[in-house]
Amino acid sequence: MKTKTRTTKKHQQTRTRNRTQKIRVLRIPMLAKYAHTLPTSGQELTQAEREADPLFRKEGRFFELKEYPAGVVRESCDVYGIQPDGSRRLLAKFRKAVLPADACQKAYDALYKVAQLWTDNRGAAAGMLNLRHVPGHVGSVVKRGKFRVFYKSAVDGKAKKSNTGNEVRSNIIGYYDRPDRNALRGGEKMHGPPCRQTAFTRDEVSKWRACQPLIRAVDRQFAKLVPDRYRAQMARCRLTPKFQIGDTAFSTITVNYNYRTALHKDAGDLDEGFGNLVVLEKNKVTGGADNSQTWAYDGGYLGFPRYGVCIDVRHGDFLAMDVHEWHGNTKMICTCPSGPKCRDDSHFGRMSLVFYLRKKMAECAR
């Protein structure tokens, strides 16, 4: 005999409210000084066309909060940028507190150690070259660029064929569509597969498994909020199941820690897809990988300077965003008693995860 589930009037009202709740829609025009006719998705630009964009000259620069006159988005909403011809372009879909707390906790604990590793290959996103922020093995400068430097080793004084940039805490997990750059010998690439597992995914099996609930939760939000981009990305992802993260539309995740990005566009991910961003905060997880006393932080907003708007993505939120539009972060400010004067970023922990599909993965289907 089947038992009927009793639904109270209160539960019915709650379900109705959840179904009919309207998400705020923001339509934001370009700031006049950055107005520019943007290319269609996947359109290849010439160097002259890229340089015609007013924001091209700002690449690698940090934008401050005062440069976002449209303000900070802190509630669930859809954000569209209004183009010069009056059409609209999806910038972001933001949802507050939609990711499971236990999945966030497990992922933070699993990724804490790898998130502390430093890298020097983030280009413009790490900001304009600052010799105080390059690796310690860099000696005298041979040739200096905007974001990279060729150098002589501080150890043996020999000129190196490789170059380097500002160090930041940023690493990749999952799969990648380029050979391991550590597999270099005398400046020559060692022969190896163009697509590969990352070291974390290969070596930290239990930790990688602990990340799966959060990865699946992010995938569900992506499918729900941006279905057309999701379908395009999933179709491409399934061409290379060996380099697909489970049954999701992702091949790769970038793990950042207390990393304020300068103005940049993401490169290497699928043009027809969409970026997915999640933030995990040290003071919001209990015990686990790092149970030291911590403070919260303010700032770290994800901003789109062309439209003068930024978004406050916090622990457990989900953001689908156009990573091919210029973007960057505002400064993170510690909430300890020293406030804005605090220079110790170990007081707080902002781990940001970016989920995407590397576009050259399809070449490994051959």
Image (cartoon, rainbow, N blue to C red):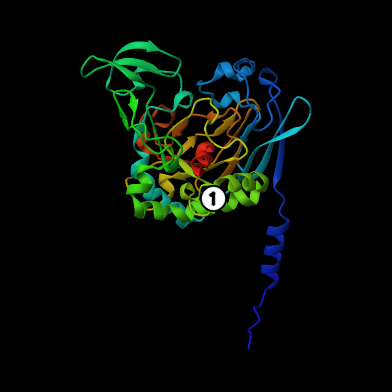
Count of numbered badges drawn on the protein: 1
| Residue 288 visible somewhere in the drawing | no
Identify the residue at image location x=32%, y=23%. Answer: 187
Identify the residue at image location x=71%, y=23%. Answer: 37
Identify the residue at image location x=52%, y=36%. Answer: 360
Where does label 1 land, which residue?
218
Indicate the position of residue 210 as horizontal and vertical percent values: 40, 55
Secondary structure under tag 1 reads helix
Residue 159 occupies quadrant:
top left
135 up-or-down from 360: above or below: above
Indicate the position of residue 61 as horizontal and vertical percent values: 51, 20
Residue 167 occupies quadrant:
top left
Residue 175 occupies quadrant:
top left
Task: Out of 115 and 161, give the one closest to the viewer.
Answer: 161
- Mark 1 crowdedness (10 Å alpha carbons): few <14, some 14-19, many ≥20: many
Q: Is residue 219 left or right of residue 224?
A: left
Instruction: Kindly identify the amino acid type of the residue bearing the numbered disc 1.
Output: Val
Check the image and name the residue furthest to the bottom: 1
